[in-house]
Image (spheres, rainbow, N blue to C red):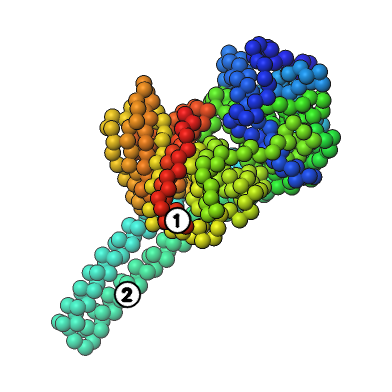
């Protein structure tokens, strides 16, 4: 079965297969053996080849029915011929293999029979749970309980009315009767009260006799459900453990590791994504990867949209990158230098590229950042503010503790003037204006922010720079500095999301079209005003 295809089938005019300086994204990780930072680009050529694959998928009815991630890998043979590998994540219409596509890792084939049997058992358990959840006795119990509650309510209403009437009678009797006659009359009222209590207790016993058998049957069904869920969880974990143990990954240094050896906490599905399949195939067929690109195709799911490129998934693929790229000398690249906009003894400003973090993330696979790159030569530098990962432009850092304190105070006091430039989708009618929308984090869709009356105040001035068709170029001057402020203010305040903003409806683009253009501040040492500017990339 032919899997690797010549590049000429997809890009007849292609000359330079490796375009790292123009990469829109880097697959990267730290080699567990040497500590080197390993990188493989998503180059323009890889994206172009991926779009040709999208054209193939568009006329394939099978691929249009099921949304999933696809990937392409450009790789060189020993004779320097460039070939194209294609892969899809998981299964396609229940099949793991498809002619012309990279096959799954051997582990899935080895355990295929056991996996099919386990999946069949899990499906049977799922059906049992559905049947137990839909038992007619549950509806019967609900109806009987509703009837009992209504009876209790009606009796309670009657008893309260009679109690109020007796209270009124007691007042009259105490005013009109004396001695034995009063005592006999009051005793009669007390007897009525006791009768009401007896009537209520009798009704409760009746209800208990009706409900108890139903409750016991439901409790028994619930206990069965808990047992089935526990058994299902254990069965699923057992299968996952077998798969993890069986999945043996190799890298370009010839090293082999099982998934548990690399990370015992990897979730289910690890090893079935495009990137591991592509890199494994290349490593076991003496191919040298040059560039890779992953994209979604088929019906949308959440933020997954057909035709859009995506980064390595953070929980499955990204933790494997360092190991899988090990031994690939072409991927070992010194981290690209950052354009320095300004530097003196107290501060440094860089032109942060889109896609690079301002500061390191929490996990080991998100350590590459402006701060970590600068600390290779400036070990004490600190970031005094941040830009979103997808936003480019002026980023300011301090070189001394005194500068750090002074600059942070300016940002907190809103003394730093910031100007951004953006391209939004839509026609902004007014030439300039002000947006005032309170923002708070969306608890169900992090890291999204949403407009909420109880959110933090957020203010932005805007000015139209240019209008061309259905695109408007804007200048933003944020007064506050909330997370995603400009992105939400554009999408909801103006009704025109920033082009390429995948979180707030900005369509498909090669990047988020938001750039920190100018930053004006008071120099922490010289006490003079300083304006820093980063050239527009779009």
Front residue of 312/139: it is 312
Residue 411 at x, y = what percent?
43, 54
Q: Residue at x 30, y 42 (%)?
A: 434
The quadrant where residue 237 appears = top right
Instruction: Write down the quadrant of residue 61 in the picture.
Output: top right
In the rendered image, is residue 83 in sight?
Answer: yes
Determine the CA span between mark 1 and mark 2: 95 Å
Residue 183: quarter of image: bottom left
Q: Nearer the viewer, residue 377 or 477?
A: 377
Residue 421 to residue 519: above or below: above
Res 98 seen here: no
- What residue is drawn where x is 73% and y is 18%? 83
Determine whether, in the image, residue 318 is placed left or right of residue 475: right
Please tell me whether mark 2 sits on a helix, a strand or a loop: helix
Q: Is residue 235 above or below residue 42?
A: below
Instruction: Choose mark 1 or mark 2, whichever is in front.
Output: 1
Residue at numbered disc 1: 526
Q: Which mark is residue 244?
A: none
Which residue sits at x=81%, y=18%?
79
* Quarter the N terminus occupies: top right
Q: Residue 514, image x and y in percent? A: 45, 35
Image position of 218 with respect to 491: above or below = below
Locate residue 142, reporting x and y percent: 46, 48
- Would residue 463 be found to the left or right of residue 379 on screen? left
> Residue 404 in the image: x percent, y percent?
51, 57
- Count neighbours of disc 1 (C-alpha within 10 A) and say few if under 14, some if 14 to 19, many if 20 or more: few
Looking at the image, which is closer to me, 21 or 365? Answer: 21
Mark 2: give few (<14), some (14-19) or many (20+) Cα within 10 Å. few
Q: Residue 191, which numbered label?
A: 2
């Amino acid at each position: 079965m032919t899997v690797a295809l010549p590049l000429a089938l997809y890009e007849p005019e292609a000359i330079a297969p490796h375009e790292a300086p123009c990469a829109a994204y880097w697959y990267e990780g730290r080699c567990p053996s040497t500590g080197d930072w390993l990188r493989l680009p998503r180059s323009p050529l890889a994206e172009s080849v991926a779009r040709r694959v999208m054209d193939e998928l568009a006329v394939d009815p099978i691929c249009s029915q099921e949304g999933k991630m696809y990937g392409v890998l450009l790789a060189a043979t020993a004779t320097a011929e460039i070939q194209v590998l294609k892969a899809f994540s998981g299964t396609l219409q229940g099949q793991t293999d498809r002619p012309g596509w990279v096959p799954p890792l051997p582990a899935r084939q080895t355990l295929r029979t056991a996996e099919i049997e386990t999946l069949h058992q899990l499906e049977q358990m799922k059906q049992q749970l559905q049947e137990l959840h839909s038992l007619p006795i549950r509806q019967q119990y609900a109806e009987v309980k509703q009837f009992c509650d209504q009876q209790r309510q009606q009796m309670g209403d009657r008893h309260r009315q009679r109690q109020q009437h007796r209270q009124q009678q007691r007042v009259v009797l105490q005013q009109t009767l004396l001695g034995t006659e009063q005592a006999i009359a009051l005793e009669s009222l007390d007897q009525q009260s006791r009768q009401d209590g007896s009537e209520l207790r009798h009704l409760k016993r009746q209800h208990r006799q009706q409900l108890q058998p139903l409750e016991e049957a439901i409790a028994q069904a619930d206990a069965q459900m808990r047992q089935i869920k526990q058994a299902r969880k254990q069965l699923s974990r057992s299968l996952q453990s077998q798969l993890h143990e069986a999945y043996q990954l190799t890298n370009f240094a010839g090293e082999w590791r099982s998934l548990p050896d690399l990370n015992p906490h990897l979730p289910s599905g690890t090893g079935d994504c495009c990137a591991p399949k592509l890199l494994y195939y290349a490593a076991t067929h003496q191919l040298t990867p040059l560039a890779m690109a992953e994209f979604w195709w088929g019906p949308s799911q959440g933020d997954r949209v057909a035709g859009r490129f995506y980064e390595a998934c953070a929980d499955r693929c990204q933790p494997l990158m360092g190991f899988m790229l090990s031994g690939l000398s072409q991927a070992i690249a010194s981290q690209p230098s950052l354009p320095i906009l300004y530097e003196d003894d107290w501060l440094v400003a860089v032109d942060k590229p889109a896609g690079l973090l301002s500061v390191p993330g929490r996990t080991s696979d998100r350590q590459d950042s402006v701060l970590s790159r600068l600390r290779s030569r400036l070990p004490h530098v600190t970031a005094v503010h941040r830009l979103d990962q997808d936003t480019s432009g002026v980023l300011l850092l301090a070189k001394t503790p005194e500068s750090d304190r002074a600059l942070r105070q300016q940002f907190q006091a809103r003394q730093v003037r910031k100007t951004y430039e953006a391209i939004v989708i839509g026609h902004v009618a007014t030439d300039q204006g002000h947006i005032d929308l309170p923002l708070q984090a969306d608890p169900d869709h992090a890291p999204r922010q949403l407009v909420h009356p109880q959110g933090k105040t957020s203010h932005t001035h805007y000015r139209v720079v240019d209008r061309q068709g259905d695109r408007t170029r804007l200048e933003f001057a944020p007064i506050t500095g909330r997370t995603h402020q400009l992105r939400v203010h554009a999408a909801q305040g103006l009704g025109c999301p920033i082009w390429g903003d995948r979180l707030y409806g900005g369509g498909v683009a090669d990047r988020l079209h938001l750039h920190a253009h100018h930053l004006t501040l008071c120099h922490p040492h010289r006490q003079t005003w300083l304006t820093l500017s980063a050239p527009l990339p779009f």
